Image: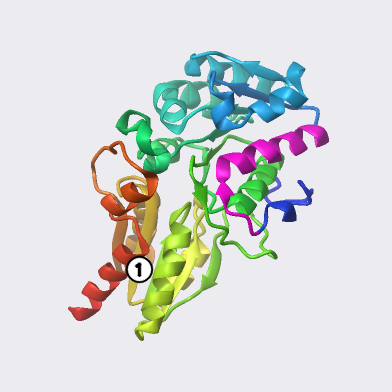
Amino acid sequence: MAKTECSCQVLEISDLFGKDMATRDAYGATLVELGKQNPNIVVLDADLSCSTKTINFARNFPDRFFNMGVSEQDMMGTAAGLALAGKIPFASTFAIFATGRAWEQIRQSVCYSRANVKIVATHGGITVGEDGATHQSVEDVALMRVIPGMTVIVPADAYETAQALIASAEYEGPVYIRLGRAKVPSVMPKDYNFSIGKAYIFNIGSDVNIIANGIMVAEALKAAQILNAQGINTGVTNFSCVKPIDDEALYKIAKNSKLLITAEEHSIIGGLGSAVAEFICENCPVTIRRIGVNDTFGCSGDAKELLKYYGLTAENIVQLALEYFKK
């Protein structure tokens, strides 16, 4: 049975608690600590180590770091080979390149072989900002989620990122972890323990429940505060693990809800919203509304302004809930 709960410490982990920081920065710091604890961990990068923060691992363990160049497909195939040889490879690049350019290699060499590869992709979503549509991956969760045997995780903050990385290193099998470029607020409580396949319920509302992951957990918590102040009892749950999704938590939330709202920095097609809708329609039908990117590409701009432009804010969640209850 694969381990799914964190059992070791990283930076005492609490060093990352309460800090507003980019999840990619938490990755860079945690990876070094994991490298110290496990000599079988190796890291591969596609010539973007300064951006993905794997440069930290390279400086500490140069003999266990491999810069594959602008060759993402080769990187995934090599990672699969290293895994089959007994290593625990972490393969990193931008989300758009990891999941798009190398999808076939991930399917055939990693997942079909059940290779123990951890794909940690940074720069996910539209908050990549000024790099524009070509670098803003809003499809990656869908691309990874559809492959048999792939675990998909979208951490909410630095603290959860560290724990998710530790759990993934201990877990036997392919894992995709989606991280971001921009700083994100710290939202998870200090007593939180990440476990693959488990959601974290902040609270369950009797009117509305917001299901979110990544940067949208912070926005969901803001929206819930506003809605509760207006007399609409609202709860929030962090579904950082999109696959396998926490069926038990989802059923519990749905049966107590008048409305479910999903919120993700990803296309509404194929991501968290789709995963929730698929389960709900078959097991506990309730009205669902989805917040996300609406079947379009990103565009260049300031990260915060792009969140507003694409309707990924607390205010948009509040508006959606109010419109439903007015009806």
Color encoding of the figure = rainbow
Position of residue 104 measured from the top left corner of the image (x, y, whole percent): 43, 22
The amino acid beneath tag 1 is Leu
Quadrant where the C terminus is found in the figure: bottom left
Q: Considering the numbered disc 1 on the image, is that residue within a helix, a strand or a loop?
A: strand
2 w.r.t. 83: above or below: below
Position of residue 194 measured from the top left corner of the image (x, y, whole percent): 64, 55
For the point 38% across and 58% down, which residue is it?
263
256 w.r.t. 185: above or below: below
Q: Can you identify the residue that label 1 sits on?
A: 260
- Can residue 100 be seen at all in this image of the molecule? yes
Position of residue 65 measured from the top left corner of the image (x, y, whole percent): 69, 20
Is residue 95 toward the left or the right of residue 266 in the image? right
For the point 48% across and 76% down, which residue is it?
204
Q: Nearer the viewer, residue 287 or 224?
A: 224
Mark 1 burial class by Cα count in 10 Å: few <14, some 14-19, many 20+: many
The rendered magenta stretch, by its main secondary structure, is classed as helix
Position of residue 214 measured from the top left corner of the image (x, y, whole percent): 48, 51
- Can residue 267 be seen at all in this image of the molecule? no
277 w.r.t. 225: above or below: above
183 w.r.t. 120: above or below: below
Total number of numbered labels?
1
Q: Nearer the viewer, residue 26 or 282?
A: 26
Quadrant where the N terminus is found in the figure: top right
For the point 49% across and 61% down, which residue is it?
247
Q: Is residue 25 magenta?
A: yes
For the point 65% across and 36% down, which residue is it?
28
Identify the magenta region. 18-37
Q: Is residue 148 magenta?
A: no
Q: Residue furthest bottom?
A: 231
